[in-house]
Amino acid sequence: MANPKLTYSKEKIAENIRINDSTYRIVLKGKFEGKPGQFYMLRGWGSEPLLSRPISINNLYEDSIEFMYQVVGEGTRILKNLRPGDELEITGPLGNGFDIDSIKGKVAVVAGGIGTAPMSFVVKSLKNSEVTAFYGFRDQVYCTDEIGRYVKELNISTEDGSVGHKGYVTDMFKPELFDAVLCCGPEVMMKKVVDMCREKNVVVYASMEKHMACGVGACLVCTCKTTGGNKRACKEGPVFRGEDLVL
């Protein structure tokens, strides 16, 4: 399936919802395109900061699109303060997402922290699969009620033990029970997931989170090491086969 057409537009924010102390969701109304695992470049300011911010598609509906983001720097602090009616520049959809049509059978979705954001759209799109989700958080758990309706089982871990299993999300995960594994989150977590899948000869797809400047493959800021040489997370990725990554 071909990627949706790349577009640039200025949109009015419908909602900018606070989820917890550092996590927010922006909602835009209208007709948008995108595949599970793709992202948009978002900009809600003038000349400074210089770069737009890459934000994955959290949810996509017939009449709206949602982006969930974590406040970690100047750009996302500006996004946090935008209000309904404020203007947002968006470019996308960008990147190569998950090949949903080829993923079937028993599927594990393993995600950590803000890496859970793109997996909402992914899980809802897995129509021919039995999905088990493994979500890991440091302490605050978010956006799990909705996803629970679309999976056979939802397993939650927190590092402080406040919710679910105390420890890391990989503690609960057994790759040999699944036909395919999809993961997104901190690179240290994804390396563990990929290594576990390689050991059990299970197909694994990893969505790489990298700093990006252009989002279209021109600047080479977001390169990832692969067995075939350096690849661009914004162009060849962000989703890669685990067997191809050098982590």
Image (cartoon, rainbow, N blue to C red):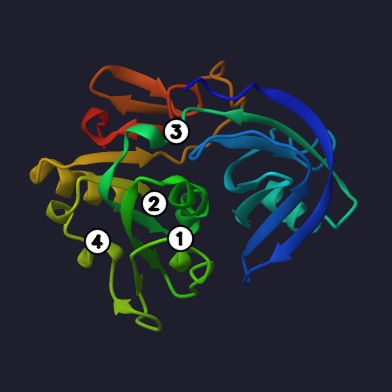
Closer to viewer: mark 4 or mark 2: 4
The crowd level at tag 1 (other Cα within 10 Å; few <14, some 14-19, many 20+) is: many
Q: Secondary structure at mark 3?
A: loop
Between the C-alphas of marks 2 and 1, the distance is 8 Å
Tell which circle, 1 or 4, labels the residue nearer the N-terminal end: 1
48 vs 206, left or right, is right
In the rendered view, does 73 fall on the left or right side of 157?
A: right
Which residue bears the numbered disc 1? 113
* Extreme-right residue of the structure: 85
Q: Residue furthest bottom?
A: 162
Residue hosting label 2: 186
Q: Residue at x 16, y 42 (%)?
A: 202
Q: Is residue 199 found left or right of 230 in the rendered image?
A: left
Percent across and percent down for residue 110 are: 33, 55
**Upstream in sequence: badge 3 or badge 2:** 2
Residue pointed to by mark 4 = 170
Q: Amino acid at mark 1?
A: Gly
Question: Residue 98 versus residue 104: which sits nearer the camera?
Answer: 104
In the picture of the structure, the residue carrying the numbered disc 3 is 238
Question: Residue 132, image x and y in percent?
Answer: 31, 60
Q: Residues within 10 Å of mark 4 (few under 14, many from 20)?
A: many
Contact, mark 4 vs mark 2 (Cβ under 8 Å): no
